[in-house]
Amino acid sequence: MADDTFSLILFSGTDDKLHAAAVLAVGAAAMGRPVNVFLQYWALDAFREDRVLKDHGMVPEAGEDGARAFQEHGAAHWIELFEQAKDLGGVTINACADSMEMFGLTQDDLHPVVDGVWGVARFFMEAGAGATFI
Amino acid sequence: MATTEITRSIDARGMACPGPLMELIGAIRRGQVGDVYEVLSSDEGSKTDIPAWVEKARHELVEVVPEDGYARFVVRKAR
């Protein structure tokens, strides 16, 4: 576990939050920081192989104007950004074992950017001094 | 100043953050030491991100030239 590890807990499964998280992961990886991502609840659901590319909506405060601005911004899809982050190196993405159980999933159900399934203690073994929750 | 010979020009105008930086990182990874890359970016984040990454990754920022509606970043692969 490196001291400058950027730990990111993803809970929400809307496209805007996943996109914001993916941008942070890419930025941290580009700056040479290890990145440790943990997927829970609706974020995990969005990483299901058959659901990654579907419309996951926006948080309520986006409203119609916000949703339109997001769509017209021309940003890369969040899964593509996570792939780029992993390609930079030092990025691991793991699914929360408890959320996996809740949804009845196995790793085969998930997009290949997901490295494995971890319990929460295993995540914190790699988390360093702090974690960011999105 | 003398004109620097550009190995490859990357037109990343219109790409959202962090697209232009990722294009530069990809080019530098595949390139040779001494190569010079020019990135054209209209993304505001590039103004801080490209210099920050170049410093962190220990390459050389040759110049940043503001143009009309975008900026031109010239970077030499140093290692």
Image (spheres, coloured by chain):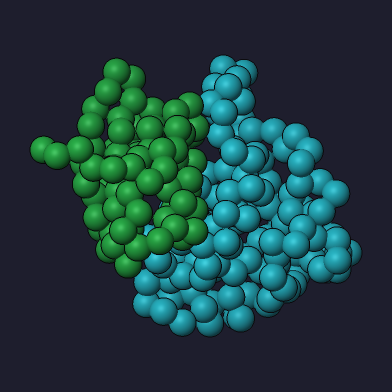
Q: For the point 86% across and 66% down, which residue is it?
A: A108
Q: Position of residue B4 (x, y in %)?
A: 23, 42
Q: Quadrant of residue A66?
A: top right
Q: Residue furthest right?
A: A104
Q: Is residue A35 above or below residue A126?
A: above
Number of marks in the image? 0
Viewer-proximal residue among A105 and A34: A34
Q: Picture coordinates of residue A96 (x, y %)?
A: 70, 68
From what the image shows, is residue B38 above or below residue B27?
above
Evaluate whether residue A113 shows in this view.
Answer: yes
Location of residue A8 in the rendering, given as x and y in whole percent from the top left corner: 52, 61
Question: Image check: B73 left or right of A132?
Answer: left
In x, y percent, where is residue A3? 37, 77
**Chain in green on the image:** B
Residue at image position (80%, 60%) is A110
Q: Residue at x 58, y 22 (%)?
A: A72
Which chain comes out cyan in the rendered image?
A: A
